[in-house]
Image (cartoon, coloured by chain):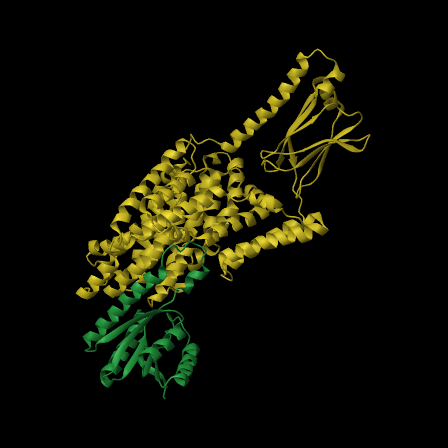
Amino acid sequence: MKKILTPTRGGEASLPNQDRAIQIAKEQGAELYFLYITDVSFLDRLASPVLIDMEAEISEMGEFVLAIAQERAAKQGVEAKALVHSGVFSEVIAAVIEEHAVDTLILGSPDEQTGITTWEYLTRLSEELGERFDLEILLLSKGEVVYEYQI
Amino acid sequence: MDKVRNFAHANRQMLSMALVFVFLASALGSALAPQKANAQQEAGIVITGRVLNTQGQSIEGARVMLHDGDENEIAAQTETGEEGVWTLEMARLPEGPLELQIERQHYQRLAIPLNPNMQQDLDERGALLMGEIELERRITSAFWAATLIFLGVLLVIAFEKLHSTTAALAGLSAVFLFSVIGGAFNTDFFIYDFERALTYINWEVIFLIMGMMILIAVIEGTGIFQWTAFQAYRLSRGRAWLLVLILMAVTAVASALLDNFTTMLLMTPISLQIGLALGINPLAFIIPEVLASNVGGITTLIGTPTNILIGAYADISFQDFLVNQTVGVLLALVGMAAYVMYHYRHELRKHPAGISETLYARLESNARIRDPQALWKSGLVFVLVLVGFIVGEQFHVVPAVPAIIGATALLVWLRPDVHAMIKAVDWTTLVFFMALFMVVGAVQEVGFISMIAVRMAQMIGENLILGIAVIVFGVGTLSVAIANIPLAASMLPVAEFLSGSIPGASSKVLYYALSMGAAMGGNGLLIGGEANLVTAGIASQAGSPISFKEFMKVGLPVTYITLTAGFLWLLFRFGM
C-alpha cells in the first residue's frame, strides 16, 4: 500500500491542505500519515525562566492537533495515522520518510499571513528530499497543488 | 498611605543628628576638660561631615583628606561610608593653613580651605562639623563608554540579536574591559572595579526569584493550570465570549500569584487546543489571555519580575502592592475586557461546533490533575509562603526568606529529585539579573541615571500629578518596545530621586506608577514582554502564529486603556 506523509500544525490555513491530502489518500487508496514536529527552539532566546518541560507540553498539543486531523480524515472515510516527533523540520521529515518508506510527501506551502516557512525553503527542501529518496513531492497552497517533484 | 514614612527624608535627618551628636560629644568633652588648647590637641581632633551628590544622595567611597599647606602633605585621610559620612581623627592639629580635599571617581575634586573661624573652633573645641558637602558630577570618557554600553545592551535585547543573558554579560564584560584596559592608561576611563560592581547586585531579588522558581516548579507539574482552563471551558458551555472572559480572569489571578511568563507557558497550549477543537480562531483566546497576564501580575510583589525589583529596591511589601494596586488592576482589566470583546466580536459571536467525544476525552485527559498529592502539599506551602510575605513584613523579614523556607519545606516534604529541582532553577535568568544589575550599576556609577533623574525633575518640577503621568505613560510607552526588566532596573534610582524631590511623592506612588507603566507597556507590541513572545512561539506551533501587526492592533489600544485606568486609580488612591 502506498504511503503518504503530510506534516501539519493544524492551524486554519492548513485545513484546506489537510483536506487535499485526505482526498489524494482516498483516491489512491494510500495509507495517510499526519506528522507533527515539535520545535521549542523559540525558547532559546528568552531570558525568563522556562521551568516546564515544554517539549512534552507541545508534543501533547501536537497529539491533540493530529487527533483533530484524524477525525477530519475519518469523516471523509480515510483512516489516518498520527506521528509526533521533535527536532529540526527537514531532519525529522527525512527520518520519517526513511523509517516508514514513504512514497508521497505532501507539504503545505506557506500562507501569506501565517506561514512560518518560506516558499524558497520548501522548494529547496523538496529538491533535496526528492534527490535523496525515491519520492513524489507535492507542494500545496490553499488545497491546490502548486509544485510537483516527480521521481 | 499617609502612614508611609519618607525613609529618605528620615534617614537624612537621622544622619544629620548623628553628625551633630559626634560633634557635640567632642565639643562637650572639650568644654568639661580643664586643659588648655595644646592639651586638647593631644587628646584628639575630630572633623566630621557627610558627602552627597547634587541630588542629595550619599556618596560612598569618596576620599576625604586634610591637607597641610605648609608641609605640603596629607595630615589625615579617610573614606566616606555607605551613608556618605566621614570622620577625620588626628592626635593634634597641624600648624599652618589647612585645606579639606574630597575626591571621588566620576566627581569633580573639591577643595575647602579651613578658614580662621573653623581653625579657631578646632583649637577651642577639638571638633569641627563640616555638615553636608556636595560633590558635582564630572562627565568623563567612562561616562560615555558606560552609557553607550548600556544602551547597546538594551538594543541587543530589544532586537533579539543575542540571548538576554548573553547580552547582559557582554555588556558587563565590555564595562570591565574598558575599566581595566582604559583605566590603566587614563583614570578617566575607569568605570568601577569588580568589588564595587558586586555592590550593585540586589541579592534579595536573586534569592526571592530562586525560591519562587522551586515553588513554581513543583506547582506547575501538578497540572492545575491545564485543569483550570478545562474547567473554564466546561463552565462556559462552549460560549466563546464567556470562555474568553473566564480565561482572562484565570490568567490574571494566576499571574498575580506565580508569574505571567510561567502562567502563559502553561495556559497557552491548552487554550489553543480548546480553540482548535471549537473551530474558533485560538488567537481570540490567547491574545486576551496574555494581555490579562501582563496586567494581572501587577497586583502582587511576586507577580512580575519588575515588581520583585521595585519591591526590593523601595522596600514595598507584598501587602502594599496588593492594597495599592489591586483596584487599579481590576479597573484596567475591565477596560481591557471591553476592548477585546469588541475587537474579537465576530469571532466570539460564532456558535462553535460541539467537540466530539474523542476530542473531549483527550482534552480532559490533557487537562487532568497529574499529581493530586503534590498539588495539595505545594498548595499548602504556597499559601503559607504568602502568609509569610504578609506577616514577615511586621518583623522586617524580607520576602526572599519565606520563599526560600517554603522552597526548602517542599523539597523536604515532597522529596522530589533534588537535581531536577535545582535544574528547575533557571540559572540563566539569575545570571541575567546579576549581570543586568551590574550594567545598570555602571551607568549609575558614572552619573547617567542621575542626569536622567535631574532632567526629569526639571521637567516635572513639584507637580506630583505630572510626575505620576510621566512615569506611568512614559515608562509605559518605552516598555512597548524596550524590555521592561532593564528599563525598570534603570528607572528605580530615578523614581527614588523624584520621590525625594517632589512634595507628596514620599508615599512611594512613583514606584507604583513605575510598576504599572513597566508591566502595562509590555502589552503594546509583541516584543514588549517575554510572555508575549513565548505565547506567540507556542501559538505558531499550533499553526496559529501571532503576527506583529495582529498583536499590535489589540495590544496598543489595550496598553493605553490600561495605563489610563492605572493612572486614574493612582490619583484617586493617593488622594489627588
Location of residue B494 in the rendering, given as x and y in whole percent from the top left corner: 53, 43
- Name the outermost residue toward the right: B70
Residue appearing at x 29%, y 50% in the figure: B249
Location of residue B224 in the rendering, given as x and y in whole percent from the top left corner: 28, 52
Q: Quadrant of residue B570?
A: top left
Location of residue A139 in the rendering, given as x and y in whole percent from the top left corner: 35, 81
Q: Tally the numbered discs.
A: 0
Q: Colour of chain B?
A: yellow
- Name the outermost residue toward the left: B357
Does any portion of residue A56 appear in the rendered image? yes
Residue appearing at x 33%, y 63% in the figure: A58
Residue appearing at x 48%, y 36% in the figure: B505
Query: Which quarter of the rendered picture does the C terminus of chain B lie within?
Result: top left
The residue closer to the viewer here, B458 or B449, is: B449
Query: Which quarter of the rendered picture does the N terminus of chain B lie within?
Result: top left
Q: Quadrant of residue B234?
A: bottom left
Q: Quadrant of residue B118?
A: top right
A85 versus B203 height, above or below? below
B351 versus B307 height, above or below? below
The residue closer to the viewer here, B464 or B386, is: B386
Does any portion of residue B307 appear in the rendered image? no
Q: Is residue B194 left or right of residue B274?
A: right
Q: Which chain is tinted green?
A: A
Q: Is residue B188 left or right of residue B428?
A: right
The residue closer to the viewer here, B448 or A8, is: A8
Q: Is residue B347 left or right of residue B563?
A: left
Location of residue A95 in the rendering, given as x and y in whole percent from the top left corner: 37, 76
- Name the outermost residue toward the bottom: A151
